[in-house]
Amino acid sequence: MVGGDICFAYGWSGDVVIAKHRALEAKKQYKIDYYIPKGGAPIWFDVVAIPKDAKNKDAALQWINYIETPQVHAAITNAVYYPSANTEACKYVDKDLANDPAVYPPQDVIKTMFLLKPLPPEIQRLQTRLWTEFKSGH
């Protein structure tokens, strides 16, 4: 997008907002915006987990506790433009980002969003095969 050769793309909010900021920094003449269709869009969330056979569970817990501190979580949002679900962190998020509906959609928009369900294995295989054929030109 930043290169100017795409005019419409399906993408995750943070990735699009990063592209928007890169285009602004590069003083591009076009505008990049993120929109959620009125009919809704997939919603996502990140999960942090510690494998049960992890060698250093205490260090993993310390790291999780560290990144979940409000100031650190806000710093992550400020750097990568993905929202934080940590409500205490919101007061440390840059005001422009906190008020950007591409980063923090309003509640009425969030209500239209949905979780993607995993595809059956045979559909995943077909999707992989078709994508591979498309990319390789065969």
Image (cartoon, rainbow, N blue to C red):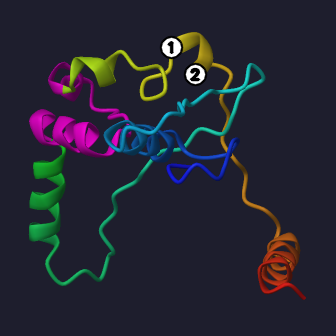
Give the label on residue 110, or none: 2
User: Horizontally, is 44 left or right of 71 in the view?
Assistant: right
Q: x, y percentage for residue 36?
A: 65, 27
Q: Residues within 10 Å of mark 1 (few under 14, many from 20)?
A: few
Which residue is drawn at the image coordinates 10% and 50% (left, top)?
Answer: 66
Q: Which structural element holds mark 1? A: loop
Q: What's the distance in space between the residues labelled 2 and 1, CA to CA?
A: 6 Å
User: Horizontally, is 112 left or right of 94 in the view?
Assistant: right
**Residue 106 belongs to the span the image colors magenta:** no
Q: x, y percentage for residue 59?
A: 9, 69
25 vs 57: above or below = above
* Dominant SS in magenta: helix
Q: Amino acid at mark 2?
A: Ile
Give the label on residue 71, or none: none
Report if the CB atoms under discs 2 and 1 are less than 8 Å apart.
Answer: yes
Q: Which structural element holds mark 2? A: helix
Q: Residues within 10 Å of mark 2 (few under 14, many from 20)?
A: some
User: Horizontally, is 66 left or right of 13 in the view?
Assistant: left
Which residue is drawn at the image coordinates 77% and 79% (left, top)?
Answer: 135
30 vs 26: above or below = above
Which residue is drawn at the image coordinates 78% and 23% (left, top)?
Answer: 39
Give the label on residue 106, or none: 1
Q: x, y percentage for residue 78?
A: 24, 37
Give the extent of the magenta segment: 69-92
Q: Amino acid at mark 1?
A: Pro
Q: Nearer the viewer, residue 108 or 118?
A: 108
- Quadrant location, the C terminus: bottom right
Q: x, y percentage for residue 22?
A: 37, 45
The answer to which image quadrant residue 53 occupies is bottom left
Which residue is drawn at the image coordinates 10% and 68% (left, top)?
Answer: 58
